[in-house]
Image (cartoon, grey):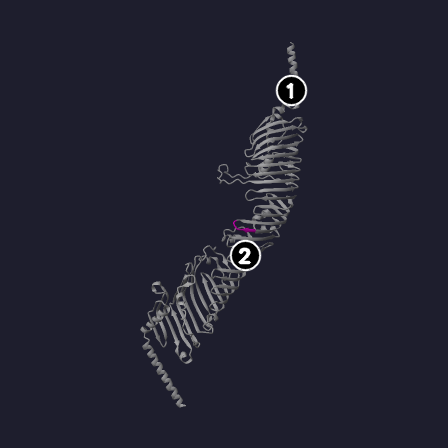
Amino acid sequence: MKKLIKISLYTVGILAALALAGGLALKLYFTPVRVKRLALEYASSNLKREVDFKSAALSLSGFSITGLRVSEYPDFSKGEFLSAETISVRPELRELIFNRKIKINSVSADGLKLKVLEAKKGTYNFSDMLAVKAPAANSAIPKATAAPAPLGISRLSVTNSQFSYKNAAGDLACAIKKINLDAENISSDGLFPLEGDFTLNIAMPQFKASMPVYLKGKAALGGWNPQKGRAEIEKARIALGAIKLELQGSLSNLIEPDAELKLSVKPFSSSDLKPFFPAMPAKILLPAIDAGAAFKLTSNNLRLNRLSFKAGPASGALKGAMAWNPRLDYFFEADIRAQIPEMDSAIISKKFKMIPSGFNIPLTEIKAVAIITPSAVKAKSFEVSAQGMGLSGSAVIKLAPAMRADVKLKADITDLSRLAKLAKTLEPYALSGRASAALSCSWSNSLLFSGKADFSGLGAAFMERKLSGLKGSLNFSKDAVTSGPLAGKLDGENFTGSFSVKNYAAHPKTVFDFKLAKLVIKTQPPAAAGKDAAAEKPAKKPVQPVFYMDLAGAAELGAIEHPNFSAKTAVFKCDLKNISDDLKALSGNASFNTGTGKLSDLYELAKSNKAAKVALFPLLALQKASKLAKGARLPDFNNIAFDKIEGDYLFDKGLMKINKSSLNAAIADASSSGSINLSGETLDMKINTTLKEGSGIKMSAPLTLLVTGTMSSPSVKLDIKSVMAQPAVKKNVNKAVQEGTKLLKNLFKK
């Protein structure tokens, strides 16, 4: 036993002496100068670049370099590729000698800087270092070697380091600065903890940001095969200004990772985004965001198996794929759901000026499913519902090769009265009833659309009128609106009809057919004049192009009521072209007839109704002419009960030709002929009036008035022929002739 102990002590002594001698020899042989020379020779032959450093040291405790600099290819005249203040490696030699394990107590790097530049697509400033030399044709096949000794690193420390990248186009620059990283118990197989922080700077034309990042987790190197490696992110924090993001999850395959990640963002204000997106409206409180993602990332593509998120009242999911080699391509399907709380649009309009205020937005549910590709965005379906109102449809927006949009919509409002709750401006219209519509529209070089609207029980108040119980449908397109049969009530009176309008945006052409039991025309109150209205000069308005419209059809009224005009029945027909405000280009024809009624001072009606003024022009002229022809002893046509009124007019470029205009009453019959220039209201008329027993005078022949001048200042003359044709005048003339003849005979006898 003692002998064994002696042998052991002797052996240990010899090993200690050998170690001491080896360490002394190592220190004497590997002087700093020799170490530096050997390192420079190795770097020059293997890296093909210039390498420089201040000092290098090799000893039993480890290897260290200070002031390391590696040039761009081929020398420092092209710039600096990599540098480090200090790099130190301290191995555990005892493990290597006795257990054939490579164990490193520590690896540290301080002030490490690496600059990566893209020269062109797929070529970088380190590509020359990755070039693989082809083996010689006659080179021997290498023999199988034993597996490398296991490697372990007790501690890895990187401090105050930096990595930067810039692409060839110059529109992307990325820098990871202030890198501090610590890892312990690093091995080729097991998980080891790591923790670090750095600042990520990104600069693009659309986005610039500096983001502090903290990372804590575990990693496994997969037996030095990164494809078999994995990582677990226990906690990661990213700050984008005042916006805080937290990340956790796991990934496998460190080269082409399969990842499962969870992301959370604390509530923030849109003001926090303005430094990065200046157009973003300020002071909009945004909710917290929670998201989860599962994806596969390779050097050529991204496969997104799932991305789900929830942000306040909004939630959704996204899946699809993206590829970028050789060109960018992607396909994503999104499913979005959101609930918008009830609010006043004034709150939104303060931030988004294009949204008008004065609307009360109800609680609204939104659902949408969309497919997104580089060439198109396709909304497979979307639904918007709020308080008995629903909107649904689909849309396709093609982005390439040419922009085009196709949209299909369906809308249903079960109670139109609810619209007044959304917009107070609609309250005076007293909307009621139900309406639905279907619309298809497309846009390429111009907008095209068509659709149909159905309504029942439709009611509304407008211009002191009340529409109720209207039922029918409308077909509409970009240049036409056509109704089906319409039925309802206007001011409580039964109403039926139909209409169509073509080219309504430029030159409307309207065709109509209406029947109304009774039309009540209410007087319009006079406009209130301003205090200094007479003194103020009217502002000059820019000259606008004349707007024309065409009108054709028939209207049948069971009765008409107005303070200045009433009739039991009325039928109006017209076929008019180029109707305008000045009536200068008016052409076509119009006719009307009424049953019994009464009129008084028609000018009051004509003041507020231009169509009535044109139809009643001959009667207006009759009223004025009857006053001016005082010697004719005509009745007061300003206040008269009539049995019938008829009118038949022909229009040619603003000139109204009176084919027929007649009024039949108990006191007189009147008819007009001639013409009226509508724009200047100049008259060239002949009015025939036949007094009847009701006036106290009965004429067997009409009395003719010749009317010229203007409507405001007419000139009236009695037609002498018509005066002479009156029986009383003839009788008196004949009597005067007979007496004259007798007188002459008596004179000649003398």
Does the magenta portion include 715?
Answer: no
Secondary structure mostly seen in the magenta stretch: strand
On screen, residue 559 above or below 219:
above
Q: Position of residue 7 (x, y in %)?
A: 38, 88
Residue 274, compared with residue 99, is above or below; it is above
Toward the front, the furthest residue is 138
Secondary element at tag 2: strand
Residue 7 visible, this angle: yes
Image spot of residue 481 (x, y percent): 59, 46
Question: Does 156 sit above or below residue 124?
Answer: below
Which residue is drawn at the image coordinates 37% and 86% (left, top)? Answer: 10
Label 1, secondary structure: give it.
helix
- The span shown in magenta is 441-445
> How far is the residue under mark 1 from the one under mark 2?
96 Å
Circle number at residue 733: 1
Q: Earlier in the sequence, mark 1 or mark 2?
A: 2
* Amino acid type of the residue that numbered disc 2 sits on in the rendered structure: Lys
Q: Amino acid at mark 1?
A: Val
Number of other residues with Cα within 10 Å of mark 2, as a class: few under 14, some 14 to 19, many 20 or more = many
Q: Is residue 341 above or below residue 535?
A: below
What residue is disc 2 on?
A: 378
Given residues 423 and 120, the one toward you in this image is 120
Q: Nearer the viewer, mark 1 or mark 2?
A: 2
Q: Quadrant of the C terminus?
A: top right
- Which image quadrant is residue 637 in? top right
